[in-house]
Amino acid sequence: DKNFYLCGADNAYVGCHGNSTKPLGRLADANLRKMKSAAHAAFDPLWKSGKISRSDAYRILSERLGIKREECHIGMFSPFQCQRVIILSKQLKEEYNI
């Protein structure tokens, strides 16, 4: 069984790391969960391609989003930020021929 936090008012939830109580991100309703999934689907192929390391991909993403690297976690993003990740990922795929 995995721990999670639930807000019953709007059916928002977030899972936890392993068996800990440390949340994986922020509480997310169905729309935000869908947006975060789409952001990962757009962004993760950048570093999974092997043409750029995961740490470099997140560093570049944080620079382009104008946020600190330590704050650059898709699990913590708003729907707007997720949409920006999708757009920036397309640009980065072109830049790196991925």
Image: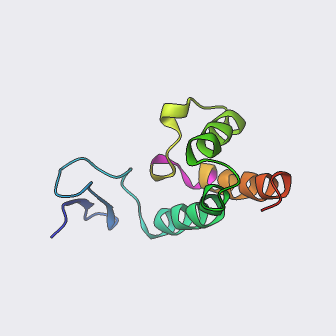
Residue 34 forms part of the magenta stretch = no
Callout count: 0
Residue 45 in percent (x, y) is at 64, 63
Image quarter (top left, top right, bottom left or bottom right) of the C terminus: bottom right
Residue 17 as seen in the image, left or right of residue 65: left
Asked which quadrant contains residue 91, the reply is: bottom right
Asked which quadrant contains residue 61, the reply is: top right
- What residue is shown at x 67% (from left), y 32% (from top)? 66
Judging depth in this view, the residue of 57 and 39 nearest the camera is: 57
- What residue is shown at x 63% (from left), y 51% (from top)? 80
- What residue is shown at x 60% (from left), y 67% (from top)? 41
Look at the magenta stretch and give its main secondary structure: helix
Residue extending furthest toward the front: 50
Residue 30 in percent (x, y) is at 44, 70
Judging depth in this view, the residue of 81 and 88 nearest the camera is: 88
Colour scheme of this structure image?
A: rainbow
User: Does 31 appear above or below 23?
Assistant: below
**Range of the magenta residues?**
76-80
Residue 90 in percent (x, y) is at 77, 59
- What residue is shown at x 49% (from left), y 45% (from top)? 73
Residue 57 as seen in the image, left or right of residue 89: left
Residue extending furthest toward the top: 68
Residue 77 as seen in the image, left or right of residue 82: left
Image quarter (top left, top right, bottom left or bottom right) of the N terminus: bottom left
Judging depth in this view, the residue of 90 and 78 nearest the camera is: 90
Residue 80 as seen in the image, left or right of residue 20: right
User: Does 31 appear above or below 27?
Assistant: below
User: Does 20 appear above or below 44?
Assistant: above
